[in-house]
Image: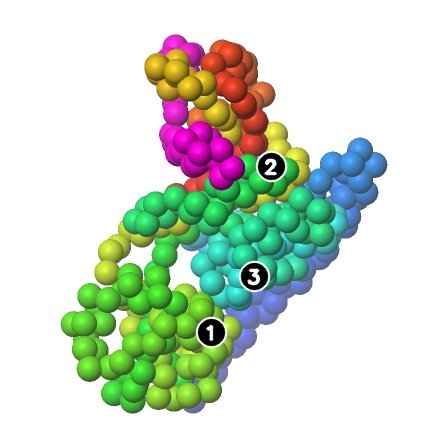
Amino acid sequence: MLNMDKVQFERLKKLRSHIDEIDEKLVQLLQQRLSFAHEIGRTKAEVERQPLDVSRERQVLSHVLDLNQGQFPADGIKAIFAEIISACRNAQRPLKIGYLGPETTFTHMAARKFFGGAPDFLPQLSISEVFEEVERNRLDFGVVPVENSVEGTVALTLDGMSDFKVKICGEAYLPISHDLLSLDGRMDKIKKIMSHPQALAQTRLWLRRNMPAVPLEEVVSTAQAARWAAVDPAVAAIASPMAAQTYNLQVVARSIEDFSGNTTRFIVLGHDCQRPSGSDKTSLLLSLEDRPGSLYRLLQPLAEKGLNLTKIQSRPVKKEPWRYLFYVDIDGHMADPAVQQGVESIREGCTFLEWLGSYPKGEM
């Protein structure tokens, strides 16, 4: 301000007044949008329809991106409208979202990525507890990891799909990035590094190259490590970027994971499946007859219908030795005639088949 002449100052003042006017209009429009969301919620309640409608929400995002025509940064548009949609969805009916805790873990981040910041997020002690709380309707939805691009499938999640009566309502992909965090952000003051064993394993090469003399300590979660770092300036934590914000920590080094591209897929658990979006996935749980060629007879009808099988994973049945359940993902929605016909064609060769859900594909 000291270097501005009077003309420049008046021009700046006028431009800011225009921004203030726009902000006032934005607030009024947001209030109107919220009012309509309340009305939509009442209408949905009359027909017992849940607030979450991923297909509609994606249509909204696509529409505003088209209207924007690249003038406002696309990532900014997505972030702004994701939170607007989240707040309006929660206005229809407040949602309780359970996730494999504690706070600031990657599952917490995935839950917020999928639902936005408006719902009430409740950490659960285990994957089984997330399933149970959703099944008993104590949670509206649950979020759990199902597979990682480096470590593979999460067995406890697959077991939960057979042990509990829930549906898959959605999925989210989250890049796994570990940061080194401390109170003041200074590497030379770090005397100990703490984290979950998996996070330590995924950053071992970086630690060996950059901090070989600093001792490592395993704790039950990256969040617990962050809490230690928040009270002890000699301790650093390997944790998520969200942990830095939550516990007021400084970043010593970003993205210290040894392998780039490490991504985890999370599934959203609920009771009602989503309507078709045009880009969907269907998940099945099945058991095959114990005879030669049974797996081939499963795959052949899907190929004949032109259905793309994207995942098949076996898990042993706990109380029946040498019997296996198969978890299958195929492209398409159960409402699609081709998917319906394909599933019915493989049912004959199965001793057991359950539809786990159809839902919009997550964005990579």
Q: Secondary structure at mark 3?
A: loop
Indicate the amino acid at tag 1: Gln
**Residue beneath the point at 52% across and 77% down:** 10
Is 310 on the left or on the right of 117, as rendered? left
Indicate the amino acid at tag 2: Lys
Q: Which mark is residue 224?
A: 1
Give the foreground label among 3 and 2.
3
Up-down relation of residue 348 to residue 5 (above or below): above
Residue range of the region highlighted in magenta in the rendering: 299-325
Up-down relation of residue 290 to residue 87 (above or below): above
Q: CA distance from mark 1 to mark 2?
A: 31 Å
Indicate the amino acid at tag 3: Leu
Q: CA distance from mark 1 to mark 3?
A: 13 Å
- Residue occupied by mark 3: 125
Q: Which mark is residue 167?
A: 2
* Residue 60 visible in the displayed image: no
- Who comes first in sequence, dot 1 or dot 3? 3
**Residue beneath the point at 29% across and 61% down:** 202
Is 327 on the left or on the right of 214, as rendered? right
Q: Position of residue 264 (x, y in %)?
A: 39, 49
Q: Position of residue 125 (x, y in %)?
A: 56, 61
- Who comes first in sequence, dot 1 or dot 2? 2
